[in-house]
Amino acid sequence: MRRSGKTAVIALGGNAISPGGKSNIHEEFANTRKSMDLMLTFIRNGYRLVISHGNGPQVGNALQRVELARGIVPETPLGVLVADTQGSIGYMIEQSLQNKLHDAGMKKEVVTVITQVLIDKDDPACTNPTKFIGQFFTEKDIQPLIKKHGWKVRYVDGKGWRRVVPSPQPVKVINSRLIRHLIDGGAIVIAAGGGGIPVYYDEKGHLEGFDAVIDKDLASAVLADEIKADELFILTGVDQVALHFGTPQETYLSQITLSEARTFDEEGHFPPGSMGPKIHGAIHFLERGGKSVTITSLDRIDDALHGLTGTRIVPD
Ligand SMILES: NC(=O)OP(=O)(O)O
């Protein structure tokens, strides 16, 4: 089928739904409903949409619930919790968007695709936990959790201690061809939530789950390439990408090229677990023919679409 309009993948941060990881389900629904206004902005600007989303706060809370109930109810492993959070967050986004479309008098189908993402089981990242999940803790509060459950943790400047889990690179999105068919059929597709459920092929060629959390910006970039999207939007907590972030030399970027993004990355401007994966995702997508990547905040997307804010990364 011939496509009309531009296709965009919109990557929503897990914090857009649960800021700080502390929201209850009512607050999560309220935050999701609010963030769906921006999807109408995209549709009105002529985009066909694939929405991906984070799950860092939610999957961390889910894993902690499993640990709190250990010995009382059967356990659920991390890989399956990624599937659980894909389903629950996908449901919240799907229903919230369906209601927004109804109120706006727009007729469009919205569907959530539970998405498996292929990883390499020999990726060194599988044994080196770096992906932040769950809430922030004080040192006093996190020590008993390290002791009791063997948590691996890292300190985030100005925010506190947070749990980390393995985060292998996404290699391929299983079902990306089906996702492409759904977009071509006119649907808005929610896919690769929480970075996708990590899977690998075993020696029999069967898919098998792996306990990790893939970075959703990297997975979104792989998906955007595989469905041949035109643009990738990464929505996060800041309006623009900065060089020398948090220092007196801090400089915000409006538009840079792919080569400049590579250079700034090599110079160490983009920390891992923060702006790093967003820039790496942008580079992955643009190197494979993507037309543009915009990094901005949820609240400023309308301004970013009009060139008033955001950081746009374009091919050389
Ligand atoms: N999976 C993932 O990257 O989630 P967050 O964006 O919420 O950290």
Image (tube, rainbow, N blue to C red):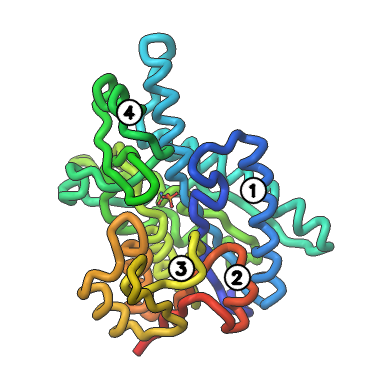
Q: Residue at x 34, y 90 (%)?
A: 316
Local secondary structure at mark 3: loop
Earlier-in-chain disc, 4 versus 2: 4
Give the image location of residue 152, x and y in percent.
25, 35
SS at circle 2: helix
Q: Earlier in the sequence, mark 3 or mark 4?
A: 4
Q: Look at 35% across and 68% down and name the residue there.
A: 245
The image quarter in which residue 100 lies = bottom right
Instruction: Say the numbered circle drawn on residue 140.
Output: 4
**Does the numbered disc 1 mark a residue whose Cβ is under 8 Å from ligand 1?**
no
Residue 71's spot in the image, x, y percent? 36, 10
Distance between mark 3 and mark 1 Cα atoms: 28 Å
Viewer-proximal residue, 199 or 42?
A: 42
**Residue to which mark 1 is pinned:** 31
Q: Amino acid at mark 1?
A: Asn
Reply above or below: 236 against 139.
Answer: below
Under circle 1, the secondary element is: helix
Q: Which residue is mark 2?
A: 301
Residue 73 appears in the rendering: yes
- At a point 44% along the width and 48% down the height, the residue shown is 194
| Beta carbon at label 3 within 8 Å of ligand 1 | no
